[in-house]
Image (cartoon, rainbow, N blue to C red):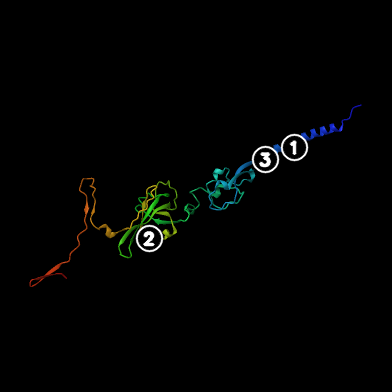
């Protein structure tokens, strides 16, 4: 007569069946996970709320893997595509970051992105002469000369009213420093608010003109300005001979005109009086 298995044998068989079942379940779930992972892609999401017009830094973003059918159009896939760029609108935490919602650094949706803190943008008109031969480009620095009639002495005066001013754009909002041609119609400057008032008043009172500063030149020159009378004050000599070897040019202001005089003799006395 066959011997019936004991309780210990039944337990062993149950354990083996349980292990087989667990393996089959794990194997099945692994295949499901593989299928799910194959359908997921990396996307860049905001790790915090990012305000509008804010430069994105690495601590504001992270990469998440989500199902491909949940990816928004034009969503960034790498952190490098987002870092250093500026948001156009607000991006909420965990929201996917689309490339269309960002502006490249230096190429914001408006010039306001490029204005330094505490400064204001103001434009002045130029032409080929006032704009240093159409050589002024975005990123350059200039000094501003104003020529106006002094209300006190009624003399025409030219003075540097601002120095070392940053150029934000030229002509019709061109901010590309690599442009072949510089300003020919206008330049847009970054100035303090009170200096914007000064430029507007000087532009109204007279004529503005620019001088282009050398790269990395930080010197500020103290100048009282030049009046028309200063041009003929004293004797102006040009000591450098001309290319043809001619002697230097000497400019001497004309002598003051004297009034006609009359001599009146009264006995032994002589009196000189101006003629009428």
Q: Is residue 170 visible?
A: no
Quadrant in which the N terminus is drawn: top right
Residue 195 x, y percent position in the rendering: 41, 58
Q: Mark 3 and mark 2: span between their CA atoms? A: 69 Å
Mark 2 lies on a secondary structure that is: helix
The reply to whether residue 144 is visible in this rendering is yes
* Label 1: element kind: helix
- Judge from the rendering whether residue 254 lies leftward or rightward of residue 74; answer left or right: left
Decide which of tag 1 and tag 3 comes sooner along the chain.
1
Q: Which residue is mark 1?
A: 25
Q: Nearer the viewer's eye, disc 1 or disc 3?
A: 1
Q: Are marks 3 and 2 in contact (CB under 8 Å)?
A: no
Q: Is residue 204 left or right of residue 30?
A: left
Q: Mark 3 — residue?
A: 36
**5 above or below 150?**
above
Foreground residue among 208 and 253: 253
- Asked if 73 appears above or below 262 in the picture, the reply is above
- Single out the residue that lies furthest toward the left: 267
Residue occupying the far bottom of the picture: 266
Classify residue 70 as left or right of residue 236: right
Q: Which residue does the numbered mark 2 point to in the structure image?
A: 202
The quarter in which the C terminus is drawn is bottom left
């Amino acid at each position: 007569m066959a011997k019936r298995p004991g309780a210990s044998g039944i337990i062993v068989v149950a354990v083996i069946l349980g292990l087989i079942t667990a393996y089959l379940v794990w194997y099945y779930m692994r295949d499901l996970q593989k299928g799910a992972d194959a359908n997921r892609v990396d996307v860049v999401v905001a790790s915090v709320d990012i305000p509008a017009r804010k430069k994105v830094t690495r601590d504001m973003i992270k990469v998440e893997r989500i199902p491909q059918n949940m990816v928004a159009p034009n969503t960034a896939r790498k952190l490098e595509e987002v870092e250093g760029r500026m948001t156009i609108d607000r991006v909420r935490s965990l929201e996917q970051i689309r490339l269309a919602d960002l502006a490249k650094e230096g190429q914001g949706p408006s010039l306001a992105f490029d204005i330094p803190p505490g400064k204001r943008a103001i434009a002045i008109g130029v032409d080929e002469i006032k704009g240093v031969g159409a050589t002024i480009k975005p990123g350059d620095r200039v000094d501003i000369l104003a020529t106006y009639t002094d209300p006190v002495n009624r003399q025409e005066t030219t003075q540097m009213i601002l120095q070392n001013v940053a150029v934000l754009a030229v002509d019709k909002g061109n901010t590309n420093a690599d442009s072949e041609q510089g300003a020919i119609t206008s330049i847009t400057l970054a100035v303090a608010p009170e200096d914007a008032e000064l430029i507007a008043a000087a532009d109204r009172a007279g004529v503005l003109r620019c001088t282009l500063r050398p790269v990395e030149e930080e010197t500020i020159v103290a100048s009282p300005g030049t009046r028309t009378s200063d041009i003929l004050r004293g004797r102006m000599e040009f000591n450098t001979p001309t290319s043809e070897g001619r002697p230097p040019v000497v400019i001497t202001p004309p002598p003051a005109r004297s009034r006609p005089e009359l001599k009146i003799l009264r006995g032994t006395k002589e009196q000189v009086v101006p003629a009428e």
